[in-house]
């Protein structure tokens, strides 16, 4: 009789870097390998692996925000052992672990809409599909896409920044784009003093619109544009404000936008952006 193969799931540690490098994931220059020491040493990040007879077959992890939201991701599997449900086992293990944590109120996972295998894994771990977003990077200031107008008024005081966020009654994105790739529930606990200090706010002359910028390193450094309406091209001065902020952060490789489906359809000329295939957020409240 063939001896059954022993599988186990555990949190990865520093010694597992070689195991991770030996996986055949098909990902060139995998950023998870590059930032692995930071992932395992940070209290906000956890990464787990499924081992079979000592061989690492699949990994996944999560990041916590405001001590109450957990975003799952960093899912990788060895291509030599796909189709056996290993990714589902790891993701389910993480989701169950988080569901037992009394501090965690919400778990989510963000994946591209064409990635059907990842979607099936996410759904099997108990999450349900939510809003779709397009991530588009404006790489050049040579082409001006919107209505012209003066640069908006900068807001510096923390209490004024919080006041603008608290007055937001409608949100076309349905989420708060906390970082690039990390759409989270719109929640005041995310708006810490440190986070708001890192954000630059501008309010329109009519004071019925505002935009937030925050630099974010995702491969290259980008200035992340957080705007909660679908009328980017109708607001005079909006793009002048984007370019002004970009000029003040010349090290940024581009301006990163999160568009809703409607907002993306409103783009007059998408060719001026570097556009990814759309992403869908899956989530569930605990």
Image: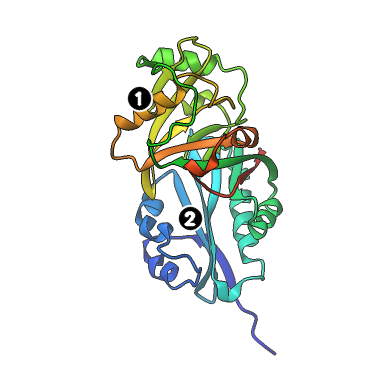
Mark 2 surroundings within 10 Å by alpha-carbon count, few (fewer than 14), some (14 through 19), many (20 or more): many
Examine the image and state in which quarter residue 57 appears: bottom right
Residue 25, above or below 191: below
Residue 134 horizontal/vertical position (percent): 57, 41
- Seen at 36% across and 58% down, the residue is 34
The image's colouring method is rainbow
Is 272 in front, or is 203? 272
| Badge 1 element | helix
Mark 1 surroundings within 10 Å by alpha-carbon count, few (fewer than 14), some (14 through 19), many (20 or more): some
If the image is split into quadrants, where does the C terminus sit?
top right
- Seen at 41% across and 44% down, the residue is 43
The residue mark sitting in front, 2 or 1, is 1
**Label 2, on which residue?**
47
Label 2, label 1: how far apart the Cα atoms are = 29 Å
Residue 90 horizontal/vertical position (percent): 59, 59
Residue 121, above or below 173: below
**Label 1, on which residue?**
197
- Seen at 60% across and 25% down, the residue is 171
Residue 233, above or below 77: above
Residue 53 horizontal/vertical position (percent): 54, 77
If the image is split into quadrants, where does the N terminus sit?
bottom right
Left or right for 48, reference 213: right
Residue 210 horizontal/vertical position (percent): 48, 19
Left or right for 238, reference 130: left
If you read the primary sequence from the N terminus, does the residue marked by circle 2 or circle 1 appear first? Answer: 2
| Badge 2 element | strand
Examine the image and state in which quarter residue 153 appears: top left
Residue 231, above or below 271: above
């Amino acid at each position: 009789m063939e001896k059954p193969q022993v599988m186990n799931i555990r949190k990865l540690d520093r010694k597992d870097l070689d195991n991770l490098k030996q996986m055949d994931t098909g990902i060139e220059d995998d950023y998870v390998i590059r930032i692995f020491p930071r992932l395992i040493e940070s209290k906000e990040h956890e990464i787990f692996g499924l081992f079979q007879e000592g061989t690492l077959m699949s990994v996944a992890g999560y990041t916590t925000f405001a001590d109450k939201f957990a975003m799952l991701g960093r899912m990788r599997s060895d291509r030599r052992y796909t189709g056996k449900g290993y990714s589902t086992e790891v993701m389910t293990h993480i989701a169950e672990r988080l569901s037992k944590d009394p501090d965690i109120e919400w778990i989510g996972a963000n994946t591209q809409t064409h990635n059907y295998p990842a979607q099936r894994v996410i759904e099997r771990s108990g999450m349900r599909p939510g809003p779709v977003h397009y991530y588009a990077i404006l790489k050049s200031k040579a082409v001006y896409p919107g209505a012209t107008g003066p640069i908006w008024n900068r807001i510096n005081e923390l209490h004024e920044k919080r006041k603008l966020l608290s007055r937001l009654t409608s949100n076309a994105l349905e989420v708060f784009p906390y970082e690039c790739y990390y759409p989270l529930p719109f929640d005041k606990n995310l708006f810490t003093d440190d986070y708001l200090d890192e954000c630059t706010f501008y309010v329109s002359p009519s004071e019925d619109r505002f935009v937030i910028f925050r630099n974010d390193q995702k491969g290259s450094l980008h200035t992340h544009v957080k705007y909660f309406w679908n009328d980017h091209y109708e607001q005079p001065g909006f793009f002048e404000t984007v370019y002004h902020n970009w000029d003040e952060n010349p090290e940024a490789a581009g301006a990163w936008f999160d568009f809703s489906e409607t907002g993306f359809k409103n783009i007059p000329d998408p060719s001026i952006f570097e556009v990814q295939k759309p992403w869908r957020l899956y989530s569930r409240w605990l």
